Amino acid sequence: MMKASTPARIATWTAAALAMLLSGQALALEWNLQRASSSLAADIHGLHEYVMLLCTVIFVGVFGFMFWACYAHRKSKGHKAAQFHENTTVEILWTVIPALILIGIAWPTTRVLVAQKDTSNPDLTIKVTGYQWKWGYDYVKGEGEGISFVSTLSTPREQIENKAPKGQFYLLEVDNELVVPVGKKVRILTTAADVIHSWWVPAFGAKQDAIPGFIRDLWFKATETGTFRSQCVELCGKEHGFMPIVVKVVTQEEYGKWVGDQMKLNHR
């Protein structure tokens, strides 16, 4: 049996090390999920990585065994094809192993899905209404109850029509941001006034369709302050790409001040 040469072994180990390094930095790459900024998003990210790793192991195992079997039992080595109709052991194995794999995926997936749907006991409830092409926000429960405003794209028309250089947050900036406090459970009630829209903030693992005549809900609890941007993700008309979602997460003290300022504006 031939052994791999030293250069070949070095190349193999180098490639393996590089692959491990890249997989460790995957969250920084554009094709991966956004960095999680809520506990729910972190669970979704963990589930994604777990299932991808499991699929990779299955892929390598199955195809590795298949190629090895073809190579080790090739006709040129004198092997003859085995003739058999059925094998009870094989039948049991290829029934039990897939069942165990499905259980291994279903268990953590169910846990995350149940957590996604648990909108009970929120600290703050906000109704989100989709319009062609803007978002309406109504604080209906919790600190800030009674605050209402509309959030519209604020990117200058000159940028959209290529008459001016694009800004840093081109098509991802609004005149009125949704403001919420960090570390508080926020329940979002989604609906729409015209056609189906979809409210989505990937950093929070939060997404729900906004359907006319229906109230649907979701929740998130931001774990860090900052500004998080997204867009409507349900094709809703000619300006579908012009209705961004911007959520500003602030400290409790800053949120209290913002609520006070908004209350003054609403009562003028």
Image (cartoon, rainbow, N blue to C red):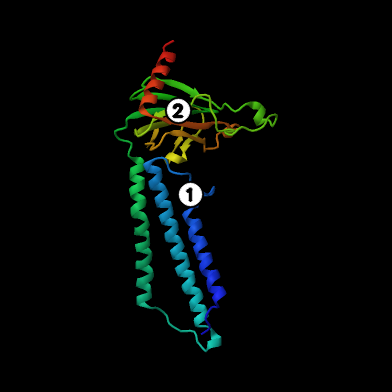
- The kind of secondary structure element at disc 2 is strand
Question: Of the residues shown, which amino acid type is indicated by label 2?
Answer: Leu
Please, which residue is most extreme toward the top here?
268
**Residue found at the far bottom of this picture:** 78
Q: Which residue is mark 1?
A: 27
Above or below, comparing residue 263 to residue 23 in the picture: above
The answer to whether 222 is drawn above or below residue 254 in the figure is below
| Camera-nearest residue between 111 and 177 | 177
Establish if 5 lies above or below 228.
Answer: below
Is 134 in front, or is 54?
54
Question: Foreground mark, 1 or 2?
Answer: 1
- Viewer-proximal residue, 253 or 204? 253
User: Is residue 107 in view?
Assistant: yes
Residue 214 visible: no
Residue 4 vs residue 110: left or right?
Answer: right
Q: Position of residue 54 (x, y in %)?
A: 42, 60
Q: Quadrant of the C terminus?
A: top left
- Percent of width and height locating residue 231: 52, 35
Disc 1 residue type (three-letter): Leu
In the rendered structure, find residue 178 and report the number of the disc placed on it. Answer: 2
Question: Which of the numbered marks, if any, corresponds to residue 87?
Answer: none
Residue depicted at x 40% and y 51%: 46
First in residue order: circle 1 vs circle 2 = 1
Residue 213, by quadrant, is top left
| Left-right relation of 61 to 170 | left
Q: Residues within 10 Å of mark 2 (few under 14, many from 20)?
A: many
Residue furthest toward the right?
A: 163
Residue shown at 50%/32% (left/top)? 245
Which residue is rendered at x = 39% and y = 40% of the image? 38
Farthest residue in the left direction? Answer: 121
